[in-house]
Image (spheres, rainbow, N blue to C red):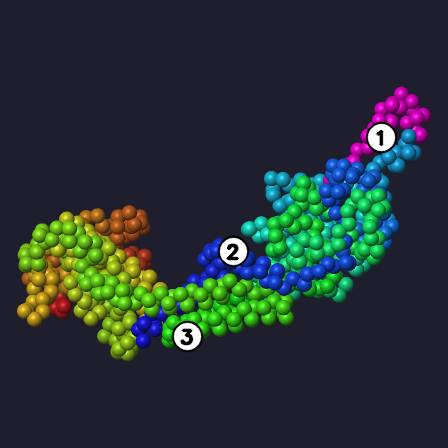
Amino acid sequence: MKRYLIRLSSSLALITVMVLVVLDVIGAPFVRQFESLLYDARVRFTAPGGQDPRIVVVAIDEKSLSAEGQFPWTRDKLADMVTELYGYGVTVIGFDVVFPERDLSHDLTTLQQLGADDPAFLQRLENYAPLLNRDHLFGGALSQGPSVLAYYFITDERQAFEIGELPMPAFDYDEQMAARLFLPRAEGYTGNVPELVEGAYTSGFISNPLISEDGIVRRTPLLHTYEDAAYESLALAMAATYLNDIALPVFVDAPLMMEGYPPLEAIEVAGRRIPLDAQGAVLVPYRGGAGSFPYVSATDVIRGTVPDPSMLEGAIAIVGATAPGLQDLRSTPFGSIYPGVEIHANVLAGILDGNFRWQPAYTRGAEVVVVVLFGLLAALVLPALSAVMATLMLLVSLTAALWLNLYLWDAQMHVLPLASTLIVLFGIYMLNMIFGYFFESRSRTHMNELFGQYVPPDLVAEMAHDPTHYSMDSEKRDLSVLFTDIRGFTTLSEQLDADELSALLNRFLTPMTKVVHETHGTIDKYMGDAIMAFWGAPVHDARHAHNAVAAGLGMLESLKKLNMEFWKEGAPELSIGVGVNTGTMSVGNMGSRFRRAYTVLGDSVNLGSRLEGLTKAYGVDFIVSAFTVEAAPEYIYREIDRVRVKGKLLPVIIYEVVGERRAVGDEELARLKQWDQFLKLYRAQHWKSASRVLENLREQEPGRKLYALYAERIEAFQVDPPEQDWDGVYTHETK
């Protein structure tokens, strides 16, 4: 059963880590990389293939560059191409090219220079200037039919230029909506010259700031924001133009419990609902590799020599660069050489068909549910199976996870991440295999760990270097001893069964023991819920008092963290008292011939135990004697009282450990100064003055038991004053 629980807890830890990775609490780039590979594989595996004849790519290819010259070409040549395309029966023309600069006509400039001295000639020239203005010619050609130009947004503040003109936005929004939209935001743009914008039907952006970290184009935004408006992408603008409709945003009213849910859920065009992710993007519905759409060379269009004119009849034409030298090649799931113009064509086809796969905002929650369900199944079942059966179980689980994922992919068009589920299944399987293989060797290591529970491993290693210098024989030595136990443990133990009590003690004793070891102390014994430890033996330690006080503070700090865990689990919180004394003690291997232990004995040890018992009486967590204060002056202390403990005739001054000097603030130091003033007045029997100082302290720290205790004493002494030679010592009759 113990082995099963260890395997189960390890598996649950792995599931927890993966859930935190899914929720982006823990960064794990390799998970995202693995998910990207799996996504690309699904895209390639399920791509329909073939060509879509509705969209034709007019390619600025090597053939066109060779025939027409270096690109960009003159605008009159582009005007001829547009005119020819409309002549072939193209319904919509889109340009995956931006024209931000004017095409200055050298013909017009030359004539103006030649006729500079002939006003009559210049006047006649003005009548022919429009025929020589190539931008005007190109704009006029665009106005012959539905045409869509391209522009791009700039997201870098350092390059926030505004070049050319923007089209009408898809929609405007106010400041309240802006705070809830997560669309890409632009700082500037590069558009087209006014004559072209005026001639074209509309424009769409072609920039894509959402390319994955590995440079692969998996999704592309349909909307981009600039100032207080959202603008359409080239593919969306072309689809709306082709369908003779406008793109309308679809907003959703998220309930209050889903505050932060992105309100923009989709775009609707001519009855087609296009689902968007939180950033207004879609997953590119790739049809296949490069060449998924018919191509025609731009030079054949310009010259009117298209081999098969029927391919353009009724088609949508996208003009774009495919020649490698024009640098419009992208990396996609189908390879690193993919024409960028075809990405727009794929998105355009997806809008027309309404076949986008999507990842809605709740996908992350669905991924967590799947990871937890498959992970819990594997965590609960695999530890109980043999290696062969566990392998078969893994194969069944992987098959089920893949089937569910592909069902959602094909039937529901929902892209559910797969990498996290596969990693959890493989991880739990490997944990169980490794545990089974190495359990025996780990058991031997566990025995060594048990031996080192009482003496810190680093001290054992130090003693092993020169064992002749260390003896188990009893001797007198100046040491520091610490006692601590859980307050109200008897009541607590009555509320728990044996297993729960054992688990609670283990969780408490483990971090406490770790603190003792880290401060080079030696565990003397565990006494139920109590711990006894000492410093300065078997290895000599000149700073044993300092280390003992550090251990006490460390225990209290560790208990705070442990109580936070208990609080989250709904378990009872613990409180402890710590007592430390420094003095001469007998240390060595003591006991009977039946059982012996390395321990410390003496009056100084007994006083340490009494100090721990006094913590509850004074309402403080940590009490040390004056001997410890003298040996460890590096800390700040508050004098508590002068006491005569049970079994001791001589009084002892006891102190509360406040903390390290560098950790105690000015406000606390001021209170300590007031407290010292109070003790002087109290021991001088100036009751009224002492009461005023004490009342001031109680106002600063209301509810502190120490102040209430002294207030009760003063009240009693005012009725029955002590003798004039009273030394301020209080005698405790109980342990």
Q: Which mark is residue 33?
A: 2
Q: In this orientation, does residue 167 appear?
A: no
Q: Quadrant of residue 453?
A: bottom left
Secondary element type, mark 3? helix
Is residue 626 or residue 264 the one in the foreground? 264
Q: Amino acid at mark 1?
A: Asp
| Residue drawn at 50 percent across, 69 percent down | 398
Contact flag, marks 2 and 1 (Cβ < 8 Å): no
Residue underneath mark 1: 107
Q: Which mark is residue 389?
A: 3
Secondary element type, mark 1? helix
Q: Nearest to the eye among marks 3 and 2: give it.
A: 3
Image location of residue 86, percent across then percent down:
85, 50
Q: In this orientation, does residue 588 appear?
A: yes
Is residue 557 or residue 652 the one in the foreground? 557
Q: Amino acid at mark 2?
A: Gln
| Residue drawn at 56 percent across, 68 percent down | 405
The 10 Å Cα crowd at callout 1, few under 14, some 14 to 19, many 20 or more, is few
Q: Quadrant of the N terminus?
A: bottom left
Secondary element type, mark 2? helix
Between discs 3 and 2, the one toward the N terminus: 2
CA gap, disc 3 and disc 2: 31 Å
Q: Quadrant of the C terminus?
A: bottom left
Q: Amino acid at mark 3?
A: Met
Q: Nearest to the eye among marks 1 and 3: give it.
A: 3
Q: Quadrant of residue 271?
A: bottom right
Q: Is residue 404 above or below residue 267?
A: below
